[in-house]
Amino acid sequence: MDKNIKNIVVLVSGGGTNLQALIDAQSRGEIKGGRISCVISSKADAYALERARKAGIKARVLARKDFGDIRDYSKAMRDTLTEEQADFVVYAGFMTILDEQVCKAFPYRMVNVHPALIPSFCGKGFYGLHVHEAALAKGVKVSGATVHFVTEECDGGPIILQGTVEVANDDTPETLQRRIMENVEWKLLPKAVSLLCEGRITVKDGRAFVDL
């Protein structure tokens, strides 16, 4: 194994469509300088685990329900990521907000994709269809997704990449969610992960600068 190839550990909780986008991008050779070495799920029944196994990727369960509080769970996750020798950690539909123990162990090495244009419609409570419901209620004309670094502040880390879609008059939360996933999330997340592995992202004064 090439020592220069970075280990990417993907955290999941559900169906794993963003994980599949990463797996597909990897199979096409689009993730340069890194490989998905492990997938860790917060739920034992997450279909994302099956996606990992089908792709021949190591799959582990670290169930949130097995831990009394978020501090204990975060410590266990930090230790598991260290054990897996993670160079980078990618949230792909991971529904648990980990505490600062993990962020401090992997500073600017953890990324998430959020289905809105941060700083709009983000933070605690804004996940899944809730994001798109809020965007449509506001009457926004464009929406999209943001890939950002994970820090102690929920959805508050430096922005790496953003992409947009137009909002149609007859959009529902479900149709908008699908359009954003297909046109933005599934393209931007693999691109950002490749940029990370290639060392083409730097952070200065709380801003991420990307060498495209």
Image (spheres, grey):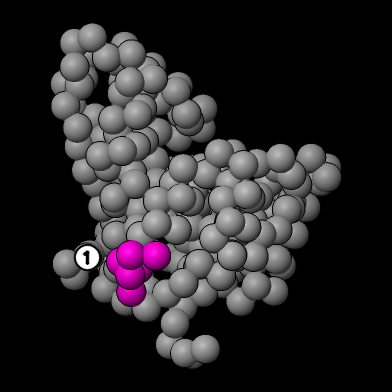
What's the amino acid at mark 1? Val
The C terminus - image quarter: bottom left
Q: Inspect this view and state whether residue 27 appears.
A: yes
Left or right, 31 with respect to 11, comes to: left
Residue under numbered circle 1? 210
* 189 and 134: which is toward the camera: 189
* Magenta range: 27-32
* 27 and 99: which is toward the camera: 27
Residue 64 place in picture, x, y as percent: 74, 44
User: Relative to residue 164, is residue 59 depicted above or below?
Assistant: below
Left or right, 53 with respect to 202, comes to: right
Task: Count the labels in the image.
Answer: 1
Quadrant position of residue 198? bottom left
* 194 and 59: which is toward the camera: 59
Q: Is residue 29 magenta?
A: yes
Left or right, 166 with respect to 99, comes to: left
Q: Crowding at label 1, few (<14), some or many (≥20) Cα neighbours within 10 Å?
A: some
Q: Inspect this view and state whether residue 147 appears.
A: no
Residue 139 place in picture, x, y as percent: 23, 13
Magenta region, mostly helix, strand or loop? loop
Residue 13 place in picture, x, y as percent: 61, 42
Question: What residue sits 22% from the left and 65% below the top?
Answer: 210
Question: What residue sits 52% from the left and 44% below the top?
Answer: 16
Question: What residue sits 33% from the left and 74% below the top?
Answer: 32
